[in-house]
Amino acid sequence: MTIADKIRNDIEARIASGTWKPGFRIPFEHELVSEYGCARATVGKALTALMRAGLIERRRKAGSFVAHPHVHAAVLDIPDIGAAIAERTGSYHFELISSHVSVSDSRASDFAQGTNIRQLGGIHHGSSGPFALEDRSINLDAVPQARDADFTVEPPSTWLLSHVPWSEARHRISAVGASPEVARLLMVSKGTACLMVERWTWREGIPITSVSQIFLGDRFDLTASFAPTSR
């Protein structure tokens, strides 16, 4: 094992164990040079490898910091957000902060007038704190079992994916600044860059759910794979 490999492994182990949490500033290059008794180029090689692996962020004149893990979601898929956060951060839980049943008046709803809906609000948490704020409505006329589902035990996104098949979906993605309420719930400053993902699903033309999820902008990636069209 080279010295660069040892430096990388040591830093990676501290990040994986939670000793160095997201946002923690790791020692400056000259400090690592002194600690490991090596050349600055060796330290630079190790830090570059960690940066390419997405484990650290290097900021000009400020140093290197443990990166916030990103959640990767396919643009053309409906991901299980809980599983994605758990995979990326090592832990996950959903905090249900509001739940009530109402009847749609159609003027401010994605459902036809008179539709019974369950409206939910919650926060998706990873090991480093809040990841996303969720506002969801579920059509109880189409999914009556959702009325009594305990979403403190199983988050609504996971529950819906496992209980309710869907045949159509639509996404809308936009950049937003955190409002005062969003900033308070996600524990960031007002105006912080966020990504809002809105999604609607149907089953054979019947609306099932609509959801708005607001992610911190530095913790969410959108991915898509395409194949060339034949000519």
Image: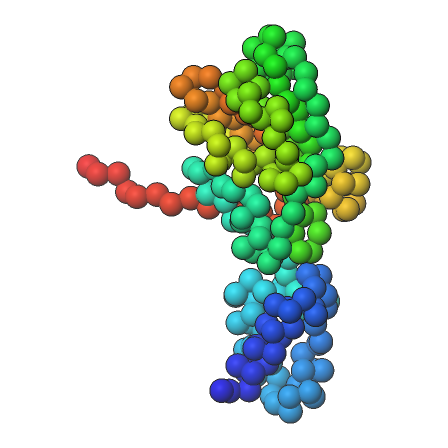
Q: Is residue 215 left or right of residue 169?
A: right
62 horizontally vs 69: left or right: right
Please provide percent x and percent y for residue 211: 59, 29
Q: Is residue 168 above or below residue 93?
A: above
Q: Quadrant of residue 133?
A: top right
* Residue situated furthest bottom in the rendering: 37
Q: Is residue 188 left or right of residue 157?
A: right
Residue at (59%, 72%) from the top-left corner?
12
Viewer-proximal residue among 31 and 169:
169
> What residue do we see at 66% from left, 86% from top?
33
* x, y percent for residue 169: 45, 28
Residue at 43%, 17% (x, y): give it: 205
Find residue 116 and report its image quarter. Answer: top right
* Residue displayed at 58% across by 26% down: 146
Task: Say if 156 sits above or below 33 in the image.
Answer: above
Q: Position of residue 191 (x, y in %)?
A: 75, 40
Above or below, 114 against 100 in this view is: above
Residue 179 higher or lower than 72, as above or below: above
